[in-house]
Amino acid sequence: MIVLEKRPQPSQAWSYATPVVAVLATMVFGGLLFAAMGKDPVEAIRTIFWEPLFGEFAFYYRPQLLVKGAPLVLIAIGLSLGFRAGIWNIGAEGQYIVGAICGAGVGLAFYPHEAWFIFPLMVIAGAFGGWIWAMIPAVLKVRFGTNEILVSLMLVYVAEQLLASMSLGLLKNPEGFGFPGSRNLQSYDSAHNAELITGTGMHWGVVAAFVAVIFSYVLLKRHMLGFHIRLTGEAPRAARFAGVNPARLILFCLGTSGALAGLAGLFEVSGPSGVVSIDFNVGYGFTAIIVAFLGRLHPVGILLAGGLMALTYIGGEIAQSQLGLPAAAIQVFQGMLLFFLLALDLLTNYRIRAARKEVA
Amino acid sequence: MDLSQINPVLLVASLMVAATPLLLAAIGELVVEKAGVLNLGVEGMMIVGAITGFAISVETGSPWLGFLASAIGGALLSLLFVLLTQVALANQVASGLALTLFGLGLSALLGQGYVGIKPPGMAELDIPVLSDLPVVGPILFGHDPILYLGIALTAAVWAVLKYTRVGLILRAVGENHDAAHALGYKVVRIRILAILFGGACAGLGGAYISLIRVPQWTEGMTAGVGWIALALVVFASWKPWRVLLGAYLFGGVTVVQLNLQAAGVAIPVEYLAMSPYIITILMLVILSADKSRAPASLGRIFHASH
Amino acid sequence: MTTPLLSLQGLTKAYPGVVANDNVSFDIGEGEVHALLGENGAGKSTLVKMIYGLVKPDSGRMLLRGQPFAPPEPRAARADGIAMVFQHFSLFDALNVAENIALGMEDPPPMGSLASRIREVSETYGLPLDPYRTVGDLSAGERQRVEIIRCLLQDPKLLIMDEPTSVLTPQEVEILFETLKKLRSEGTSILYISHKLEEIRTLCDHATILRLGKNVGECVPAETSARDMAELMVGSALQTPERASRAFGEVALDIIGLSVPSPTEFGTSLRNVHLTVRKGEVLGIGGVAGNGQDELLGVLSGEILTEADAVKMAGQPVGRLGPTARRRLGLLSAPEERLGHAAAPDMSLTENALLTGSVRENLENRGFLKWAEARSFAERIIEAFDVRTPGPENAARSLSGGNLQKFVIGREVLQNPEVLVVNQPTWGVDAAAAAAIRQAILDLASKGAAVVCISQDLDELMEISDSFAALNEGRLSTPRPTAGLTVEEIGLMLGGAHGMEVAHV
């Protein structure tokens, strides 16, 4: 018989090893899944993980890694602060949408005027949009004790409807021949989040993601607020005893994650996407949850996890076109990764050993 | 705008249909939460139930087998949640989210060949005389059997929790798992059974959407119903009959807004479509003052150390 | 000699790093009250868990009336006539008395007839209880009654009681003893676990003494002096704390007419509490747990805010200040619950030192943390209070209860408080550590700090406090000088017998 035994303290070694083991286990089981679908598992895994980085068209895919990874990292960093404190914002997808709408809205309001201050204003508006959307669950939780998980999630559906309404109404391109969707910001210089260095995929969102990683690292390691965030997650009563104001912490964590998600939305709409359209959001807000956990809620871990997840997105697209692997298979693959990670986390806090024979 | 198109009898009858997926999922989750487990994967289990039920109905031509398969599918997915939270002692919030994300992906994968197909229908109850009564007939006696199953399940859960020893033990485990363990009850076993029951109910609820309410298969067709079911349990203060009431309330909102859309009210379609979600939030706010009924061990990890 | 009811033969149980029971053997006779005596951590709980089927022994065996007895689970033990009253109650707050009792029975009758049986038994044994009351609303003494009646309804052959008197007032203890004596006269055997020697001398026929998991001796308590038993139990002579005689200074802490609703559902609200502590004074606050102790600590630590004037430090209103601001002024506190309240279990000792020490020990600079200083503060605590740990990077949960408690108390004492509030400073702590903690509290007072010590342990309060007050259902009695107080008077201050009556023999 096998028993679990709580370790006197969490194992450092396992906390680094679990993400790696989880990725390996996902490759194995993902391979089995692909095999069950009649695809060559080795080929599929190779296509997903190798092709984007070192394949024939890597020069094209590598910049895409930054483009896909940046919003994931940006959102996940924000989420990780809350998750560490036991504050569960799972509505980043909605905050991402509202950030994009607000940012794009500000930009489009100036159209066709060209000026240097337009893009910075859009950035502020994007962050504000995400922030205000996240403040709804935050304020309701502080004021009425409402469950933030459910409220933030409900607001995703509301945001999606808002997005539909905007792209069909207020923000619709007047010169778009009646098609839904806004003007393309890529062709409006003052509002375009263009590549900073051509051919690298590096845009302002990538810069913001790196800044967020550093900011979060310093906050968690060196600052009292970060200590309080960790303390609240580990032992809420001890946090109160230490003098943490739970309401302020909720407002901070939800607000920050909302603002970062809003920023991610703004950088996306003004850069890679260009238009506010009904299908603008592609699930970054949810995938970022996986990224946050895969990175063990640690800033550097999230950076790596964001890269890995971006890889599966791009690799998945390649596998889709080359091997005919359905897009949903990649979604399953990503979900599987989160499963393995959560399951293996057990080894950080518990030791598994065979129980001695019971005496009759 | 033409409100006269809206027929109140049909409105009530279709409200009951709209409420049933919610009711099934929420009553299952209520049992899970009463046992002290928070499974946020309802949405994932519903969508997996929706596609397994749909696929099996189409393949076998029998909606009954479809519903049976959907319950098994939902329960199987919840088995993953069991492994994570009861065996690997993972955080329940994160595990529930994982279940939902995985379930959405899995259902999309399973459902690839089923887009645009019409499933076999399920005969509605037809009791001579009773079903033909004006007003009362279509509302009370003119539905499919699963709708009545939902109501029967609510009654059964209420009775079991209130009057039986099994119910008492289930509540005890949810209130204080350490004390229940000290008295010799198998906390983990009881919770596993509750989670599987919740999974089966969510699966049924999902299949009700794809087989009866819509009826067809599209990706992500549960559209947050699983999350509303979670909210409903809170809203109902963990009481079965209040779940029923809440489900009919939300069903009512959904049906009314759909009817208003159809009637061409001056409010844009998107704002009508977001109303069920906004009303859910408002309900949560109004009722979040009353926290007292939440099972005390809800969401806490149990590990028998000694 | 007749066959004993239960015979334990060479029971051994080891956990990683500790042998909880090492080859323990003894017999419990029919109709005998058998004491199991030992310090915290001596292995008493593990031993009874083996008898009750919660834990399986690694080796050794048990005989029940001569037959091999190895219950795989509590249900089996109960079926064989073993019943147990737990130290930490195994009750369900949100359920009512009858439901709680039904959960502890194999084949409970329908609720209606169960309720009338509860009334019947409770009155026979002088333990009145309303079967339909919600358990969360009951006092500690009443909750214990629920457990006892749950056991009695099973007609047990052996009743195990784990530290039953720690939650009772002296008067309630007397009534409990009457009940137990009545049970003995009816032929029920009782295994009575305690570390209180006088109780054992009055009640028990036979005693087995455990130390560090081993059976170190047996005796007939009535014929053995308390001192001899204490030495067997502890293994060495204990130091009683020294207290220097001292003069009290000005008023350091003042609570005037404080009423606060409890923040938790089944908590106790504080009602019109007055108290004054002077510099150099130790005020002892006695009372059975659950009478407002946690709330009082919260009010003083700043976790529960009140009107500004209700709590004053040296005349200055502090009622609206949070914990950090109060620490800045020198009002420090140490809550009862070590893991999760006073300390974060999964965080290192360095981080736990930072938890309350940041303001007074200057461990932050405009919000940025000084880890090196925090670490050296943790090292100073470990050093000064003899905390046994490999180093400050270890997690709090890796420490034993006594060591962690020394760390928690040491952390506050080393910050030189003006006023220190402690709740249950030695609960679950071995005797040596308890003595060290009490000495530290007395030393602090002799340096001029005011100390409020909340404790259930009356002996402890008599030992260290200058004045004594009792908390009962959220009300605080008027403090009186400790010197000259009798047990009777203390008992009355604690609320007497809470409406219990002596068993109808």
Image (tube, coloured by chain):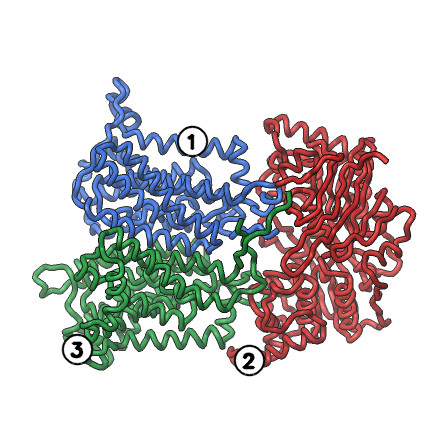
Chain colours: A green, B blue, C red
A173 on left or right of B171: left
Report the amino acid beneath label 1: Ala
For the residues bearing labels 1 and 2, Cβ distance under 8 angstroms: no
Residue at image location 85% in from the left, 42% down from the top:
C205
- Label 2: which secondary element: loop
Residue C466 figure quarter:
bottom right
Badge 2 crowding class, 10 Å Cα cut-off, few under 14, some 14 to 19, many 20 or more, is some
Residue corresponding to mark 2:
C370
Residue corresponding to mark 3:
A189
Instruction: Estimate the x, y position of residue B134 in percent, counting from the top left.
Output: 24, 23
Instruction: Estimate the x, y position of residue C4 in percent, counting from the top left.
Output: 80, 37
Instruction: Estimate the x, y position of residue C178 in percent, counting from the top left.
Output: 82, 38
C63 and C285: which is toward the camera:
C63
Residue C322 appears in the rendering: no
Q: Residue furthest left?
A: A177
Residue at image location 38% in from the left, 74% down from the top:
A213
B192 on left or right of C174: left
Residue at image location 22% in from the left, 39% down from the top:
B215
Q: Which mark is residue A143?
A: none
Measured in 3D between alpha carbons, the distance from the residue under mark 1 to the one under mark 2, in whole angstroms, is 60 Å
Of badges 3 and 2, nearer the viewer stands 2
- Label 1: which secondary element: helix
Badge 1 and badge 3 in a common chain: no
Q: Residue furthest top?
A: B129
Q: Chain of mark 1?
A: B
Residue corresponding to mark 1:
B155
